[in-house]
Image: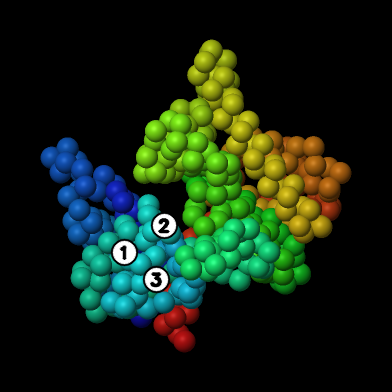
Amino acid sequence: MTRSVLVLNSGSSSVKYAVLEPDSGALVAEGIVERIGEDVEQGGVADHAAAMQVVFDSLADDGHDLDSLGLAAVGHRVVHGGPDLYQPTVVDDALVARLRELAPLAPLHNPPAILGIEVARRALPDLPHIAVFDTAFFHDLPPAAATYAIDREIAEQWHVRRYGFHGTSHHYVSEQAAAFLGVGTDTLSQIVLHLGNGASASAIVGGRPVETSMGLTPMEGLVMGTRSGDVDPGLIFYLWRTAGMSVEDIETMLNRKSGVRGLGGEVDFRVLHERIDSGDGEDSAAARLAYDAYIHRLRKYIGGYLAILGTVDVITFTAGVGENDAAVRRDALTGLTAFGIELDEHLNDSPSRAARRISPEGAPTTVLVIPTNEELAIARACAQVMDA
């Protein structure tokens, strides 16, 4: 019987799920349960336990009862594995306890992931549950890239380092880019740009990351949908002392009320472009500033990675914005022909959703668009654990 893996990505108010066959890569079913914790009478879902039942009901409605799916495991996306957890790991009570200890490193992400794991283990007690960590791919960053220049003893005591995130996506996309080009990852110097609501960049040499934009938490780096990305650390002390904001208020602002939304009032890039094009006073100006700041930071990281890598064989755009926004891709790379980087405008404007090249034939640096598939990567990581 063909085996499949149920992949769960549990957030504070949603559970995204997919059933995949790791051996063939086939997607059997997928969906998302939203509005967890909201009023049930208004269409909300009471809690994560109820959300899990909605997942099962949705699968059954699509003709996929649990007995017929051939489920071999449940894979859980866990954002932060801390300094020690970087291999896909079978979940037991000790692992859950360790994840609770790590929650302060990712207070917005790990607690709902833990909750999702607990609910799923109760609902499917006879299956192995496997945690796959977003930080795993970047675990072995070179020390110079992983280290913050702060007091060494404090850093060691509190596990302060640059961990990096979206690792499952960066790993998958870098391998898919090499496969698209028909070469091994060991032959390539790559920049991968994962541009979604959360956004991150990585520099990869020979299949191993040497830099990434996110750090101790998923707030560092690029301008994102609602996250600030890089800011002067002094900003926090200034707002605490001068504006009278609490640490919790500052954290909420930087995580949920900053980035493109904080500047332009909108997280959807399609709406952002519409506001820019409208030329309609203050809203248009705010949208333009948000977009320009986003592109400026992105180009700054691309330039930095060019300096680190020396030469770049391939630059790949992925995730929601990276895969679908031709303007972002164009503006991110405009003016870089001296570095061997250019776009074919016709290819870049193509509405295709497939993996594709968008640079001119024969350009020194190949520019690609590769759809990410973190769920499949997680399913395959689970299969590796089961086969070990």
Q: Quadrant of the N terminus?
A: bottom left
Residue annotated with mark 1: 114
Q: Position of residue 359 (x, y in %)?
A: 75, 47
Residue type, mark 2 in image = Ala
Residue annotated with mark 3: 131
Q: Secondary structure at mark 1?
A: helix
Q: Is residue 129 left or right of residue 265?
A: left
Q: Residue at x 60, y 36 (%)?
A: 294
The CA distance from mark 2 to mark 1 is 12 Å
The CA distance from mark 3 to mark 1 is 10 Å
Q: Position of residue 156 (x, y in %)?
A: 53, 69
Q: Position of residue 362 (x, y in %)?
A: 84, 52
Q: Are marks 2 and 1 in contact (CB under 8 Å)?
A: no
Q: Position of residue 173 (x, y in %)?
A: 60, 60
Between 88 and 354, the one nearer to me in the picture: 88
* N-terminal-most mark, 2 or 3: 2
Residue type, mark 1 in image = Ile
Other residues around mark 2 within 10 Å, as few (<14) / some (14–19) / many (≥20)? some
Q: Nearer the viewer, mark 2 or mark 3?
A: 2
Between 153 and 316, the one nearer to me in the picture: 153
Residue 106 image label: 2
Above/below status of 41 relative to 68: above
Above/below status of 303 relative to 240: below
